[in-house]
Amino acid sequence: MPRRIPAALLVLGCVACVAAGCGAKHNEPYTAAGTAPCLRDKGFAHVTTNPGKVGFIAGFAENGGVRAVTKDDNVLTIAFTGSDADVAGTMRAFTRQAAPQYKHHMQDIMESQGNAVLVWTVTPSKQQLDDALACLHS
C-alpha cells in the first residue's frame, strides 16, 4: 500500500524549493534577439532589431534594442541594458531625450523589467503590456 505524504511536509517541501530557486527564471539578461521572435508571434508588426532603426538609446544598448508596432499603431521601443543595474541610467536617458509631448507622461509610457526598458508612444493597454512583458527572453 503506497504511503501518503502529509500535507504539512508537502508545504514545507514547496517552501524549501522556492527558497532554493527551483523553477525560478534563470539570471541571464533579456536580449533583443531572444525577444523579437515572440513579439512577432504576438502580432506586433514591423519588429526590428536593426540598431539603425530602433532609435539611438536602444541602438546602443548592450544587449540590443527592439522596435515594434501594435495593431493600433502604438510604437514600442525596448532597450536591453547590460544588467539590471544599468536600467536607471537608461530610463534617465529616455526621459532626457523624449520629445516634449512625451516628457509629461513618461511614468505612463515607460517601465522596466529586469534589464529591459520599455517605452511606448502612448500608454499601452493591459494586453499590450502583458504581451510585451511575456516576450522578454534571453
Image (cartoon, grey):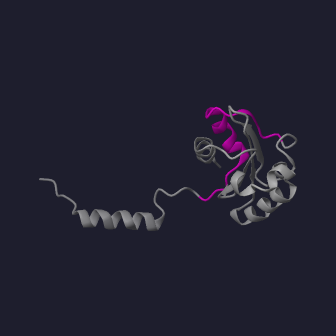
Going 44% across and 64% down the picture, which residue do you hit?
18
Magenta-colored span: 27-50
Task: Determine if the magenta segment contains residue 47.
Answer: yes
- What x and y, as percent, mark residue 49? 78, 41
- What x and y, as percent, mark residue 44? 68, 34
Going 86% across and 52% down the picture, which residue do you hit?
100
Using residue 121 as the reference point, say whether residue 133 is left or right of it: left
Using residue 19 as the reference point, say whether residue 113 is left or right of it: right
Near-viewer residue (1 or 96): 96
Near-viewer residue (24 or 42): 42
- What x and y, as percent, mark residue 41? 62, 33
- What x and y, as percent, mark residue 34? 67, 44
Using residue 46 as the reference point, say whether residue 5 is left or right of it: left
Count the labels in the image.
0
Q: Is residue 14 above or below residue 1?
A: below
Question: Residue 3's quadrant in the figure?
Answer: bottom left
Question: Residue 85's quadrant in the figure?
Answer: bottom right
Near-viewer residue (120 or 48): 120
Using residue 92 as the reference point, say whether residue 117 is left or right of it: left
Task: Determine if the magenta segment contains residue 31.
Answer: yes
Going 27% across and 66% down the picture, which residue do you hit?
9
